[in-house]
Amino acid sequence: MSKTVILIASGDLRDSANQVCWSAQAEMEQQLTAAIESFGYEVKRGHDYDAELGHGFIRSQRQGIDVFREIDPDAPLIVAEAVWQYSHHVLAGLMTHRGPILTAANWSGQWPGLVGLLNLNGSLTKAGVRYCSLWSETFSDEAFLTNLKSWLDDATVSHDTSHAAALDLAACDENARQVGTEVAETLRRDKAIMGVFDEGCMGMFNAIIPDSLLNPLGVFKERLSQSALYYETLQVDTSEAESVRLWLDDHGMKFHTGPDHATDLTDAQILDQCKMYIATMRIADDFGCDAVGIQYQQGLKDLLPASDLVEGMLNDSVRPPVRSRDGSRELHPGQPLIHFNEVDECAGLDGLLTQRVHQALGQPVENTLHDLRWSDRDLSGTVEGQVWVLEISGAVPASHFEGGWAAAEGFRQPPMYFPSGGSTVRGISKPGDVVWSRIFVADGKLKMDLGLAKSVALPDQETQRRWDATTPQWPIMHTVFRGVSRDQMMARHQANHIQVAYARSEAEAKVAMQAKAVAASELGIEVCLCGDVD
Ligand SMILES: C[C@H](O)[C@@H](O)[C@@H](O)C(=O)CO
């Protein structure tokens, strides 16, 4: 391999985030560069630090394309990430790059760099681009250095992915097979609509399912606009929104409010979120949507508070009632209206299957995506080994907390991401048996990985340490994946997001996982079970 390695860094579209996160990126690049140089290679940055902007990230697709024009297409290239990044900033260039590609992240929870890495990996996989991927806490550990040397010398790295095995339908429980088959048949026959409020969030190419892959399953997109959501939000009567707020207060949700719109969560922001909740339900009703996804970051973030509180309510069967515009009907009474955060359509499809499978099996229907944010040893010693921090950037259904809404807290979304604020739905996901899953696109097909996990209880101090090490405004699930090590998960998972749903017991979780696997498989999705699933 050439002795000169090009290093690039993709960032956020929001310079406020790029500026805050730059020092962590600079430190990570220094460590990574030292490791590469120790093997006799030279590192050259593919684009400069911008003194005026105060960061050195690629901050748009345009800039990314321009940067790649100056890069030798055959040079070895590293995309280094310590922050949340938009994959499309670099995807265009990576798609035509001929030299070896490595994606690398620092093992840190401080900013969502691992989340950014996983999104880029999933996007490259969907795009059919060959790449290798590495992560490290210190960039000096043996496992990392061995793989780095192997990439530098031979353009290969090796990760253990033996935890994934193709689904064996014959090995599935009879009940699971029956329920899974029925769910698949019903979906194909009756069809379903996913309402997509502005397709494609933050460059998450991997999250978009092409219609040609989705429609054969009986699922169709209704392409909706966040402008329509904004308009409808403004039409909602304030008194209706106040009843939603009252419902939340009565159910014990605790909002941490203050007077300053720029930095605090305000009552006015919460009221706007309550209006948006009603507006979303009404638009979903207008279009007969079975699930909806709000892009919510770009576009909406400057007009309205973030939609997290809205999403937490939508995804729960215990939520404030919403009536049709003429007041004649309650919309989806006692049922969640499935919401897929950041219009992640893979999560939306998964949510549809999960809700139907869990409903049929009498299991809790509430499900959500989370970010695979970080994993660390449990320093309290309560749980042996690694415990993952699953932490979605805003809200989960409150039923995931012990105590439901009474355990939910609302914090202001961080200003660097959300200038118009908005409440999160924060809490600790209760201990219990969890089915995890992820639908993704690879080799031009839909695929799905599933497995079992435990949501575990950790002492308050350890929970706080994990929040402090990540984003304390966001909800957390302390997760132990059964039979999947930290590095196996990182090596195979094709998304920043992961879907989770509870079951009432370990045995029931296994049946629920199998039933969902069968449903997916009957729909033509290539399914793998991961880890210890017996
Ligand atoms: C607020 C940020 O943009 C987050 O939404 C981002 O880090 C993610 O969570 C991506 O899944």
Image: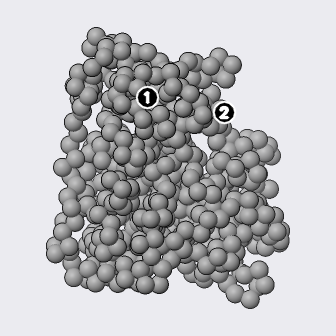
Query: Which image quarter: residue 142?
Result: top left
Residue type at mark 1 is Ala
C-alpha gap between disc 1 and disc 2: 20 Å
Reply above or below: 351 against 70.
below
Residue at image coords 26%, 60%: 528
| Secondary structure category for the residue under label 2 | helix
One can see residue 108 in this view: no
Reply above or below: 361 against 476.
below
Reply above or below: 467 against 145.
below
Reply above or below: 291 against 67.
below
Q: Which of the two residues, 3 or 284, is positioned nearer the viewer here? A: 3
Residue at image coords 54%, 45%: 203
Position of residue 315 measured from the top left corner of the image (x, y, whole percent): 55, 68
| Secondary structure category for the residue under label 1 | strand
Q: In the visual, does 130 lie left or right of 127?
A: left
Name the residue that disc number 2 marks: 16
One can see residue 52 in this view: yes
Position of residue 76 measured from the top left corner of the image (x, y, whole percent): 35, 24
Name the residue that disc number 1 marks: 80
Q: Quick one: quadrant of the C terminus?
A: bottom left
- Eye-nearest disc, 1 or 2: 1
Q: Quick one: quadrant of the N terminus?
A: top left
Position of residue 149 measured from the top left corner of the image (x, y, whole percent): 24, 22
Residue type at mark 2 is Ser
- Give the mark nearer the N terminus: 1 vs 2: 2
Query: Which image quarter: residue 452?
Result: bottom left
How crowded pointer 1 is (Cα within 10 Å; few <14, some 14-19, many 20+) is rated as many
